[in-house]
Amino acid sequence: MGMENTTIVETHSLTKRYGSGVLAVDSVDMSVRRGEVYGFLGPNGAGKTTTLRMLVGLIRPTSGTATVAGHGPGSPAGLKTIGALIESPGFYPYLSGRENLRVVADLASVSQKRVDEVLDMVELASRAGRKFGTYSTGMKQRLGVAAALLKDPELLILDEPTNGLDPQGMAEMRKLIKDIGHGDRTVLLSSHLLAEVEELCDRVVVLHRGEVKAAGPLSELMNVKGFQYRIDVSDVDEAMKVVRSLDGLTVEPGTIKDSILVSSDMDMARVINHALVSAGIGVDQLVHTQRGLEDVYIELTGVAPGSPLSSAPAPPPPPAAPVGAAKP
């Protein structure tokens, strides 16, 4: 099967530099396969939204190329198969949710019958008669997703869809993404929330200061260092001396009382246990631990989860386009 049939988004050295000198996106290479939920992970300000805006043709790259749904970014043929919610949803506050969707459906040349279908999908049918201006943040996000689904898109692009939601709203939105991100539909999900990406995504790209730091299946990213062990011992100081004398082991930060953490590229459980016991150190427990996405994230970006990126701010985005145009 050809590459054009297995991937729906492909970028090569995609770059965006603003006139002020800010390098917002730096040579991003990414490949999104059809039918997967693909995570676009990075701290706030990492360049995620700028990349997504380039993919749908809202802004032009400074250099590099992108192919989206078999077409160049922003081409009418490509936009017919793409639904997107980029930044916050923009609707007329004095119209109801249903009326707003009807406006978007007309702009997108979609049958009005589809409006009620997508309202059911996002569980807003019972509140679709209320004015958008009275909606909660969660309802507004749901209506934005509904608008993105109007064309029954092959590719759904969601930019921080749980932003501003309370815990219940976040859980509901994640369930919605699970429900709609299956079968032949592809979801490209931008997020700075580790739990969200870990729960929803098949593969992920980690972006930091506009650069790709890692990409691949979550299982591979979380096993970059191979084996990790927590060792409960009778004498931590003496145990430290022993494990540091062994080749192929690295002592990890975060040592807790009566325990040490080590990592290795290979299974060394027996070697570690034998060395400690031979040195007269009691080993109460030696456990293989699962490396978390948080560990990988901090290691790759140097930014603690949820922390803002400390860099020069990107210039403000251009004025919002009419409803339905800015979010094709």
Image (cartoon, grey):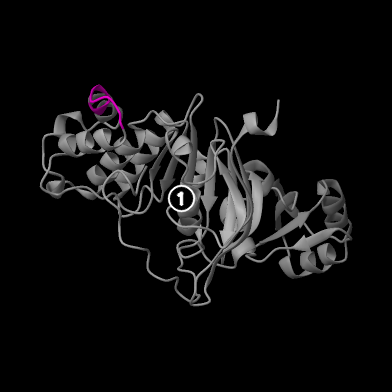
In the rendered structure, the answer to whether residue 295 lies left or right of residue 117 reads right
Name, please, the residue furthest toward the front: 76
Residue that carries the numbered disc 1 in the rendered image: 57
295 drawn magenta = no
Does residue 224 lie above or below 119 as drawn? below
In the rendered structure, the answer to whether residue 11 lies left or right of residue 109 reads right
Amino acid type at image mark 1: Gly
Q: Position of residue 178 (x, y in %)?
A: 43, 33
From this viewpoint, is residue 45 visible? yes
Q: Which residues are magenta?
A: 109-115
Within-10-Å neighbours for mark 1: few <14, some 14–19, many 20+ = some
From this viewpoint, is residue 192 visible? no
In the rendered structure, the answer to whether residue 82 lies left or right of residue 248 reads left
Does residue 323 lie above or below 27 as drawn? above
Give the camera-side residue of 249 and 287: 249
114 drawn magenta = yes
Q: Position of residue 219 (x, y in %)?
A: 65, 42
At x 39%, y 43%, the residue is: 84
- The quadrant of the rendering that contains the N terminus is top right
Residue 242: which quarter of the image? bottom right
Number of disc labels = 1
Q: SS for tag 1?
A: loop
Does residue 219 lie above or below 190 as drawn? above
- The quadrant of the rendering that contains the C terminus is top left
Q: Position of residue 53 (x, y in %)?
A: 45, 53
Q: Position of residue 292 (x, y in %)?
A: 60, 50
At x 87%, y 51%, the residue is: 271
At x 42%, y 53%, the residue is: 58
